[in-house]
Amino acid sequence: MDKTVMVKNFSRNAFEYDNYSTIRRRCANDLISHIKGHDPADILEIGCGTGIYTDVLSENHSEARIVAMDISEEMVRAAREKNSNVTLEFRVADAENAFVYKKYDLITSNASFQWFTDMDKTLNKMKNALSNNGKLCFSMYGPETFRELEEVLSLCLGERKWLTSGKFISLGEIEKILRKHFKDVVLSEKRYVAEFSSLWDFLKDIKLSGTRGDGLRKKTFIGRDRIKEMEHIYREKFGSIFATHHVFFCVAKTPYS
């Protein structure tokens, strides 16, 4: 995955992001339920984007000190502009490469871990950044995300994995990595469905929400005529224009030393 292109895509549309993040909001509200009963004083949020999940964390843990980081400077700028909480600090940083110099009671992230290039190394770093009784709790996209669009693209352009989501790891793979670093691991998955009036609106949503990642394989150009053809196939095959968001919820604690 080309992280440089991915960051550029997120940054370009940072100030429109919130208008195209309905599923991310639903994920954020579902993710916070996995933290119930845990009362962290220090929280590290990874991949905060424009602060959608940050707001949920602040509401549910109003006394906690929160450090929220994102790789996109434009995303962090958008988050800062709408949040003046004095116990909240925003940082521009790539979580995979940033040095974590303190311990946190909770390390959490909403729908960003799928972008990591070295999951094993990064989870090991996070394990070492947890305090005693600390918890890692995150959601991430799974490989069935946009499976309907993937199928239509393969019918129109030839059989292959066209979308970035095809490179996302499976629930079994993330479980294997987590269990390498933590004694206690709980995982679940959920499929959200987003409805659209047209394929064009769906593609616009993918673009402005950042979920396209680094774009189509081999930078394929799809013109309006091809989009019309794809929409016809989409409706014929699925009945309407909708998209599956395949999401994993992962909770881990009790790190191996």
Image: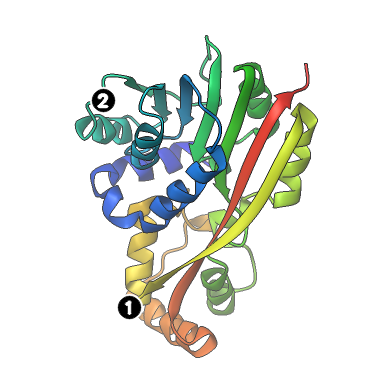
Q: Looking at this view, is 230 or 189 the one in front? A: 189
In the image, is residue 197 above or below residue 79?
A: below
Nearest to N terminus: mark 2 or mark 1? 2
Q: Residue at x 41, y 69 (%)?
A: 222
- Residue 108 versus residue 115 in the image, above or below: above
Q: Where is residue 98 in the image (x, y as percent from the top left)?
A: 51, 18
Q: Mark 2 is on which residue type? A: Asn
CB atoms at circles 2 and 1 under 8 Å apart? no
Is 7 placed left or right of 170 in the picture? Answer: left
Report which residue position mark 2 lands on: 85
The residue sitting at 32% across, 78% down in the picture is 197
Hey, which residue is sitting farthest front in the picture?
Answer: 37
Q: Where is residue 229 in the image (x, y as percent from the top left)?
A: 42, 84
Picture coordinates of residue 212, whole percent (x, y): 45, 54
Q: Quadrant of the N terminus?
A: top right
Q: 113 or 103: which is nearer to us?
A: 103
